[in-house]
Image (spheres, grey):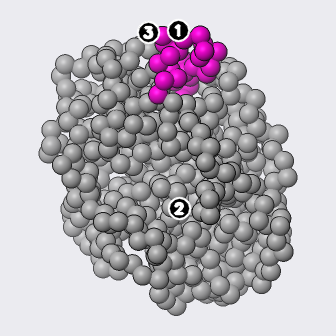
């Protein structure tokens, strides 16, 4: 991989972002049509590895969804193969199969752009009975671990109550469908996976923390994704993040560990397995993605020293989400394909047929926004340790107690003056009367925002037909100035926020959908950013509403195929 100077890296990643914007007159470059003959295989596997079958959850967890947001509420569980299996099942495992006529495809607990799932996951374990010391690749379809590397060192590499999860991306999985914009979506999916892992860890009373100091070179070495002979013609994986999973987070351990030492153990370990080829032919490799990958390579850095502020406790009084088992809610998460546009309109008109149907209130919105703020020991935002850099632009359609219009929620209220300087000068900046004091939510302009939301989300009606939609806006230029690799980190943060919105929507009997197709500069123009002003940039859209069910689709259990068959494992 060629090396670039910091200046060259910054120029390259800024150019990638500009080049891959969607515009009203044209879309970012993508395939002319989908090459269904060479659609990527849905699952990465390694032939020639010892496979460890993991136990499946037999019933819903006793842990409730609301329990996840209460510090010390859940007793930490022991480090065991059973509990590692639960973490993987509830974060990266299958949630269901869908079938239409002869076509069948899987859904997973972690959201993914286009359900393409470019994210691969690995366990690095040392002190867990039943799991060999080394590196293991997780196969969600089979719910098993493939041992890629066996460590041969005698010295301890990790504290007794810890293990690691490494994430990588196969860019081709997204590029097959989305072309040049795929690099963005892979980073969003890494953020979805981080949040999914953190939520699943919380069901066990465990902590999950992104190791912000890790370099891409260290991650590649530990995961073995830099091993040319193990891939040959197979699509390569690219490093994302390394997470530290701590099973007893309240117990302060004096044992320190070093990723350098783990990387050395990986270098000297015994490796197994050959990666499968996902597509026998690639009609277009989209070289700009390779350029962005090189430009955003991360070297080893110091851990972030930012500390989350002290905030009021979360509101746990809602009767709409307190009774859900956490595992049930996590597994039922889906991306809505279409919303019932008449539902909330009819409620507002006093239609008797819908008066007893679910509503979306200002208190529900405030709780949703509150969950996006960083609090110590509260998932999933405590999985990252950098200052919040993503803020929420809200297109409010049908929220009881709040006037319709365009709003801005600041997850780091230090930037209010910067926003006010760069956004339209006639914006109102009015805080709703019912809004809690610690939530920096401001109405910019009142009015019907439905058509604007639809138009800016590539004319998709789902952004118009729900209760509200979001544009996730990043503090962009200042964050990238000295650290071009933060480009990826901004998308991770946006993906983490997306998973919060997904689960909160599910908890109140609504449904969410992430939207990767939007007109970037159209959003900026709406709020008053001029074309060459890169202080802020829109990175993701999201919408919430009452989902319509497609009765043509059959829903099947996620792991019935394992119960039906006697799979032979090497």
Residue 435: give x, y in percent of width and height: 47, 15
The 10 Å Cα crowd at callout 1, few under 14, some 14 to 19, many 20 or more, is few
Q: Is residue 430 above or below residue 173?
A: above
Of 339 and 414, which appears nearest the observer? Answer: 339
As measured in the structure, the alpha-carbon distance from the residue carrying label 3 to the one carrying label 2 is: 42 Å
Name the element at disc 1: loop
**Mark 1 sits on what residue?**
350
Q: Dots 2 and 1: beta carbons under 8 Å?
A: no
Which of the image's four quarters has the C terminus? bottom right
Instruction: Give the crowd class for mark 2: few <14, some 14-19, many >=20 residues within 10 Å.
Output: many
Residue in view at x 40 percent, y 14 percent = 403
Front disc: 3 or 1: 1
Asked whether 130 falls inside the magenta stretch, the response is no
Of label 3 and label 2, which has the lower sequence position? 2
Q: Quadrant of the N terminus?
A: bottom left
Asked if one can make out residue 149 in the rendered structure from this viewpoint, the answer is no
User: Which residue carries the number 2 mark?
Assistant: 117
- The secondary structure type at the circle numbered 2 is loop
Q: Picture quarter containing residue 538?
A: top left
């Amino acid at each position: 991989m060629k090396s670039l100077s910091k200046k060259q890296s910054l120029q390259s990643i800024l150019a990638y972002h500009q080049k891959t914007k969607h515009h009203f007159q044209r879309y970012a470059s993508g395939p002319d049509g989908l090459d269904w003959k060479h659609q990527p295989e849905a699952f990465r596997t390694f032939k020639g590895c010892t496979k460890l079958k993991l136990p499946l959850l037999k019933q819903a967890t006793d842990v409730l969804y609301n329990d996840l947001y209460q510090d010390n509420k859940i007793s930490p569980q022991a480090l065991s193969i059973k509990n590692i299996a639960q973490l993987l099942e509830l974060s990266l495992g299958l949630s269901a199969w869908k079938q239409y006529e002869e076509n069948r495809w899987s859904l997973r607990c972690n959201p993914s752009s286009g359900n393409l799932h470019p994210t691969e996951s690995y366990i690095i374990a040392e002190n867990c009975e039943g799991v060999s010391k080394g590196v293991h690749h997780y196969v969600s379809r089979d719910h098993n671990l493939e041992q890629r590397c066996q460590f041969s060192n005698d010295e301890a590499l990790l504290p007794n109550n810890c293990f690691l999860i490494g994430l990588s991306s196969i860019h081709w999985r997204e590029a097959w469908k989305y072309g040049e914009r795929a690099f963005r979506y892979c980073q969003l999916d890494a953020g979805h996976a981080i949040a999914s892992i953190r939520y699943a860890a919380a069901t066990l009373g465990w902590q999950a923390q992104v190791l912000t100091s890790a370099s891409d070179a260290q991650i590649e070495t530990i995961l073995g994704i830099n091993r040319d002979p193990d891939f040959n013609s197979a699509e390569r994986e690219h490093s994302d993040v390394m997470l530290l999973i701590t099973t007893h987070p309240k117990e302060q351990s004096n044992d320190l560990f070093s990723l350098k030492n783990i990387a050395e153990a990986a270098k000297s370990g015994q490796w197994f397995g050959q990666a499968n080829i996902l597509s026998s032919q690639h009609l277009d490799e989209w070289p700009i993605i390779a350029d962005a990958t090189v430009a955003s390579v991360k070297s080893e850095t110091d851990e972030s020293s930012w500390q989350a502020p002290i905030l009021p406790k979360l509101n746990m009084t809602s009767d709409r989400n307190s009774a859900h088992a956490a595992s049930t809610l996590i597994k039922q998460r889906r991306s809505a394909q279409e919303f019932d546009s008449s539902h909330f309109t009819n409620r507002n008109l006093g239609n008797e047929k819908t008066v007893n149907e679910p509503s979306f209130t200002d208190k529900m919105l405030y709780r949703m926004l509150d969950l996006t703020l960083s609090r110590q020991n509260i998932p999933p935002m405590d999985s990252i340790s950098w200052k919040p850099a993503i803020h929420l632009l809200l297109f409010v359609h049908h929220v009881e107690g709040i006037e319709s219009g365009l709003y801005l929620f600041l997850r780091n209220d230090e930037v209010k003056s910067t926003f006010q300087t760069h956004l339209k000068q006639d914006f109102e900046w009015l805080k709703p009367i019912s809004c809690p004091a610690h939530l920096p939510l401001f109405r910019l302009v009142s009015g019907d925002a439905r058509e604007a939301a639809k138009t800016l989300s590539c004319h998709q009606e789902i952004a118009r037909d729900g209760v509200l939609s979001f544009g996730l806006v990043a503090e962009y230029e200042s964050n990238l100035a000295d650290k071009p690799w933060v480009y990826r980190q901004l998308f991770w943060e946006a993906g983490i926020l997306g998973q919060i919105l997904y689960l909160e929507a599910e908890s109140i009997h609504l449904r969410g959908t992430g939207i990767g197709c939007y007109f970037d500069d159209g959003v900026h123009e709406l709020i008053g950013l001029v074309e060459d002003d890169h202080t802020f940039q829109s990175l993701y859209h999201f919408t919430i509403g009452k989902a319509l069910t497609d009765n043509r689709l059959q829903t099947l259990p996620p792991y019935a195929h394992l119960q039906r068959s006697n799979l032979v494992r090497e």
